[in-house]
Amino acid sequence: MSHSEVKYAGFWIRFVASFLDTIFLALPIAVVIYFLSDGDWFDFSLYQQNVQMAMSGNSHALDAQPKTSMRWELLFEVSVLVVTMLFWKKYRGATPGKKFVHVKIVDAKNFEDIDNKQAITRSLGYFVSTFTLLIGFFMVAFRKDKRGLHDLLAGTCVIYDDYAQ
């Protein structure tokens, strides 16, 4: 398959896929971990109190931040990464969100399924894309091949599934 036959997935379709994955993957994992932690992961009651204070116009709403257990936060982050990579493996580069919008992650050179090294590198690359003030994600909107920093690091790209082998 040549580069001219490939239709790269752009910023907004990837944004929609990520939003759907947040709902279908991250949110259920968060609920499970919250209950497994018996509320120790995140002080939800203080968060609710802060929201109520903010909505009533109280300027001190964010003075006290909910405490977060790093142990449970780490378990959440690792769980999301593992589940995401399992979906990539099982569904040939697609999470539920990507499947819904008909895009998939492939090797940027040969447009074949990604390997485990690429999956891990890409997952960790999300942190790099995030810590660069999200520039790593916004690169997708400005590059011809629609690759973000995490894609460049992993040697991957996201294409429409109709064009996949």
Image (cartoon, rainbow, N blue to C red):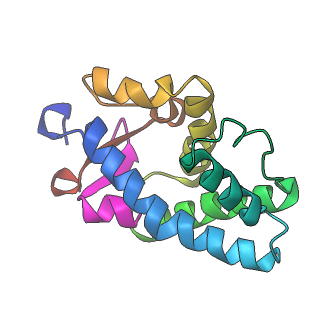
Q: Nearer the viewer, residue 6 or 26?
A: 26
Q: Is residue 29 left or right of residue 10?
A: right
Q: Is residue 1 left or right of residue 114?
A: left
| Callout count | 0
Q: Is residue 146 left or right of residue 50?
A: left
Q: Nearer the viewer, residue 39 or 116?
A: 39
Q: Residue furthest left?
A: 5
The image shows residue 50, relative to residue 34, as above or below, that is: above
The image shows residue 36, relative to residue 121, as above or below, that is: below
Identify the residue at horizontal 30%, vertical 20% (top origin): 142
Q: Position of residue 120 (x, y in %)?
A: 62, 48
Q: Is residue 115 left or right of residue 70?
A: left
Q: Position of residue 67 (x, y in %)?
A: 84, 53
Q: Position of residue 121 (x, y in %)?
A: 60, 41
Q: Nearer the viewer, residue 36 or 44?
A: 44
Q: Nearer the viewer, residue 39 or 127?
A: 39
The image shows residue 155, relative to residue 103, as above or below, that is: above
Identify the residue at horizontal 37%, vertical 37% (top origin): 108
Q: Which residues are magenta?
A: 93-110
Quadrant the N terminus occupies = top left
Identify the residue at horizontal 24%, vertical 23% (top origin): 144
Q: Position of residue 61 (x, y in %)?
A: 69, 43
Quadrant the C terminus occupies = bottom left
Identify the image quadrant of residue 124. Answer: top right
99 falls in the magenta region: yes
125 falls in the magenta region: no
Identify the residue at horizontal 24%, vertical 58% (top origin): 101
Residue 112 shows in the view: no
Identify the image quadrant of residue 103. Answer: bottom left
Residue 65 shows in the view: yes
